[in-house]
Structure formats: C-alpha cells, structure tokens
Image (cartoon, helix red, strand yellow):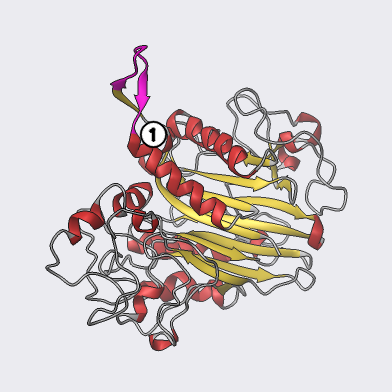
Amino acid sequence: MARILYWNIQQFGINKINQIGKKRDLNGNRLQTPESGYRRDVIRTTLTQNTPDIFVVVETSTGGGAPGTLISAGGSTGSRYLLGLIRNWLGANWMLIPPVRLGLNGVTEGISVYYNSANLDFTGPWGWQGGGNASDSVANIGAMNLVNYAHPWNTILPLGNVNANSNINANRAFRQLAGQWQFRGPGVGVAPGPVLGFPNNFNRTPYLTTFWDNANNRTIKLMSFHASPKKNQAANGTNQLSNIQEMTVNLAANEVGVIVGDFNVDIFNTYFEPIAYNNLTGAAGYTRAINPTANQWPDKGYVCTMLRSHNNARPWDTNGYSGYEYVIQDSFSSVDNILTRYGANAGGPAANITIANRVTGTPYNRIVNPPGNAPEGYYVYETGMDQNIANLPVALPLPPFGPNGVGGYNPGDIGALSRFKGWANYRRIRSTSDHMALIIDI
C-alpha cells in the first residue's frame, strides 16, 4: 500500500508559513509573525502524526503566466520553503514536483505534490523543455530535447533515472520530467480527441502526476483537481474527469488511478452531486471514498470537510459530536473527496480513509455505534488545539456529555466562545485552511 495525504491549504504561499511582520529584533531584522508559526505547526503535526508517501497541496498561489509554465511569486517560494520544512520533519528523501499553472486569468492556481523518493519514483508522465515553455508530452518535445530544471527548481527532484520496470518513462532522468496539465477526450479512429475543458477552457484543469511503486510493482496515476467554486461549473468540470483517457480506457492492468481534490460539489446536494459523480462512479469504474450519510445531524457531521470562519464558528453541542457548529453546514459542507480505480494487477481496494479533523481529533469514536452508521475514520489525529497541554483552558471539552451529543459547550457558558476561537485553539486551525485534509491507503 502507499499512503496519500491530500489537503486544500487555503491560498497557500510563503505568507501562510513564513510571514514577515513589522516587528524587528535588536539588530533591526523584521521578525516572522506568530500566526505563520501557528499555521506551520498545524501542517507539521498533520504530516507527522500519520506520515504519508505522497502529500498533495491544492490551491497553491501562482503569479501570472501561461498554463503549464512554472509558478512564480509567493506560491513558488512557499512550495519550496515547505519542502525544506518537510525534509527536516520527515527526511531528506522528500521531493517536490515543480508546480505549474493551471487555468487562466483570475482563476489560475497551482498544485504542489510532495513525495518520498525512498518509496516512489516520479515518472512524469510529461517532460520538461526548459525556459518559459510549458510542460508537454515527451513525444511532442522529443526525448533528446528534454532538459533539466533551472535554478531555483533544480534540486527539488532527485538525481537519477526512473526504474527500468516502469511502464511510464522508464530510464528517463527524474529532473527532466513534469506533471501533465492538458487532456483530450475520446478521438475518432487514429485522430486525437478534442482538448477538454473543466468545463470551460479558462477553468482550472486537473494535474496528473505518475509514480512507479517498486514495492508493489505498479504505477500510481494521481490526478489532483480543484474545481470552480461555481456549482454548475464545478459539477460539469468534475464530470469531465470521466472523459480523461489516461484515467479510464488507458488505465493498464498494473496501474491504479487515484483522483483527489476539492470538487466544490457537496455530496448532499441532490441536484449537482449526480451530475458530478455518476459517470465517474458508473462507467468510469471509480469508487468514492467519502459518501453521504442520512443528511441529518449529528451523523452528517462525520463526513463534513469544511470549516466555518473563526468569527462564525461555535463550540456548542447543538448539532452533536463530531460536527457541532464549527463545520460549514450549507451546500459546501462535504466537497473534498478521493476516488480510486484499480487495474487487474494493481492491488486494492483502497482502505482507511480518514478526514484529518484537527479540531476534535479522529477517529470519530467517542460515540459507540454512531448514528446512521456514520463512518468513524481510521487514523488517529490529535486535536491541534491547546486543550491537551497542561494548565491551559479547555477549548472544546471532550468527552463530557451535552444534551445533543458528546462534548462541546452548552450555549451561554461564560468564556467558552472566546477560549474556543483564540489563536491557541480553533483560529490556528481555521487560519491554516478552511478545509480538512484527507488521508487514505491505496
């Protein structure tokens, strides 16, 4: 098995984890803000409590430029700075696939994919041609025209070549490979199919990165996607994933297809959810990891993936464990997901899907036999709030029983809301992202 941690880290860039403030030290140097330190700690503990083999960060800032070219500005420095932190936390074998721009104009974003090169070989599937050019297929560039990445991207991939057993880019240099950002639908005869939009040509495209998994003698095709926030575009863009040939008809026997992302379609939305997912989970053959409960509280809270702003979140037990009133409860409550499909010789099925809830912690096992047989998750994550540190106030009491669920304050408890919302507690988690991470074994 290989373990994947996916996370939409809201507006990820250098200021998220290394923001320089106005205060100065005795030598006149401006100091890092404590807020970025809090966020960095939330990311660190999410990574280290259950170490993945691949870590996907959606919503990386890009700077201006054409689709398929390397990101710049705060996302560029932030993604490489995080790589340095990850190498300190998890080891020097961790690498970063150079992120490229996805989409056009004001909707452009990047996706940062980190991986442990001791366990996996990055295999592309596309190549790098240097300069200000976009990544492209190795066939279009020409194998002899592939080049190494230039500074500052030249050391984020390992030296060496892809394993000879890989069915994608065997023996090619890691530092000349790139992720794929453009896709075509079914063709007619030998003619290639049309370039796909998601759903339009200006929307962000998915990002495909491939890996050779030597321990399991297979290829991992990892597609990461951040759909439009507009519901209709999100549903149709997600549906379009079912037309990507690399992930459907061209998935080989020793390949596993994995689709992770923020699909911006709530699994409880009875109109848009079928548009988004029916073809993926039907003809395309994918299995969705997170699925609706009975669409009522408290069992609905077990599958929510989005957090309210710190100004609107509440620690009350009104909705019961595990959601309370800090998760978003409207049509964007559960929009992050993971889908998998296995070739005949690629292992499977996927297992241990867990929503990495850093507010209450996981698994959601404080209630025996949860309502509606709601999923508890598998991996253990401690809360990221300071209630576990001695002599500090309890931010969200667990597991005392409230009138409607396990834990949470009763409305009107003096000081409860301010303790809960402070930087030592909920605000550091929500400031890191409005999404919870997902982790799965594939």
Q: Is residue 159 left or right of residue 200?
A: right
Position of 215 relative to 28 (above/below): below
Split into 4 quadrants, where in the image is the N terminus? bottom right
Q: Position of residue 105 (x, y in %)?
A: 39, 38
Q: Is disc 1 surrounded by few (<14), some (14 to 19) or many (20+) residues within 10 Å? A: some
- Which contiguous range is marked in magenta? 23-33
Q: Position of residue 61 (x, y in %)?
A: 43, 38
Towards the viewer: 400 or 238: 400
Position of 36 relative to 399 (above/below): above
Q: Residue furthest top?
A: 27
Mark 1: which amino acid?
A: Asn
Residue in the image at 35% along x and 53% along y:
386
Which residue matches tag 1? 15
Split into 4 quadrants, where in the image is the C terminus? bottom right
Residue in the image at 84% along x and 47% along y:
163
Towards the viewer: 305 or 19: 19
Residue in the image at 56% along x and 78% along y:
282
